[in-house]
Amino acid sequence: VNAGNEEAALDLLSYSGCKVLSLKQITPFFSAGKLTATFSKINPREMIMFSRQLALLVEAGSDIAAALDLLSGQITNRMLKNIVREVVADIRGGLRISQTLQKHPKAFSALYCRTIAVSEETGNLESGLRQMADYIEKQATSSKKIKSALTYPIIVLVLAVVVIAVLVTFVMPAFIGLYSSLGAELPGITKALLAIVKFLLHYGLFILAGIVAVVVIG
């Protein structure tokens, strides 16, 4: 179980109807720790853990507002903590959970909200929460694989830009000077190579930045 301290863990287990024999601390809830609390971005792992913990409490028969209130005390990410507290207030004010989640697109995607709305209508909220936890986990895994696959090509591209810069700065001027001293015209292939090199020098960094941006955002 994920909790901020031993007392919170006992409360969480009690809500779940578990009989506690012993507790041993392994990692804190949302283990990003102080860094997570400092930066407001909500990462996939936090949403996965939140959804699964909420599903566990709902399945155990806990009131949805009480379950969310309990979880809000364990969340270290400031943005997610504040959002969950607002959701609790809205639910206690008469809104359904699917309605209040739609007010927070930074944490809950349109797909997440639709899934929760359907599961809420069918009286199987915990199933919808688990489905979204599994979906987010699969998406995060796929994104990680894509980033890993693109790491090597990016490194190769960076090295290529460095090599080209060295060629243009040191090698090509000497080569061109030699041809000029002999009164010879540069071969067509050499001219084409120079044109390509100049293009890469002018736009190579922009191309590289675009690739890196796609990898990071994706």
Image (cartoon, helix red, strand yellow):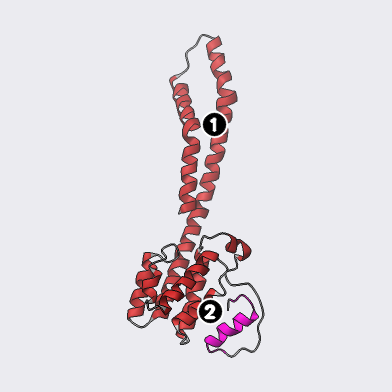
Above or below, comparing residue 127 to residue 80 in the picture: below
Structural crowding at the residue carrying mark 1, measured as other residues with C-alpha within 10 Å and reported as few (<14), some (14–19) or many (≥20): some
Relative to 1, is 57 on the left or the right? Answer: left
Q: Residue at x 56, y 14 (%)?
A: 178
Residue annotated with mark 1 = 164
Q: Secondary structure at mark 2?
A: helix
Above or below, comparing residue 178 to residue 207 in the picture: above
Q: Is residue 56 visible?
A: no
What is the x, y in percent for residue 161? 54, 35
What is the x, y in percent for residue 71? 53, 76
What is the x, y in percent for residue 208? 49, 41
What is the x, y in percent for residue 212? 50, 46
How many labels, in total?
A: 2
Q: Residue at x 53, y 49 (%)?
A: 151
Q: Amino acid at mark 2?
A: Leu
Q: Secondary structure at mark 1?
A: helix
- Of 113 and 135, nearer the camera is 113
Structural crowding at the residue carrying mark 2, measured as other residues with C-alpha within 10 Å and reported as few (<14), some (14–19) or many (≥20): some
- Which circle marks residue 70 in the picture? 2
Which quarter of the rendered picture does the N terminus lie within? bottom right
Relative to 15, is 128 on the left or the right? Answer: left
Which quarter of the rendered picture does the C terminus lie within? bottom left
Q: Residue at x 49, y 80 (%)?
A: 67
Q: Amino acid at mark 1?
A: Ile
Dividing the picture into quarters, in which one does residue 2 lie? bottom right
Q: Main secondary structure of the magenta part?
A: helix
Q: Is residue 211 visible?
A: yes
- Mark closest to the chain's N terminus, 2 or 1: 2
In the image, which residues are magenta? 3-18
Above or below, comparing residue 17 to residue 154 in the picture: below
Residues at marks 2 and 1, CA–CA distance in whole angstroms: 58 Å
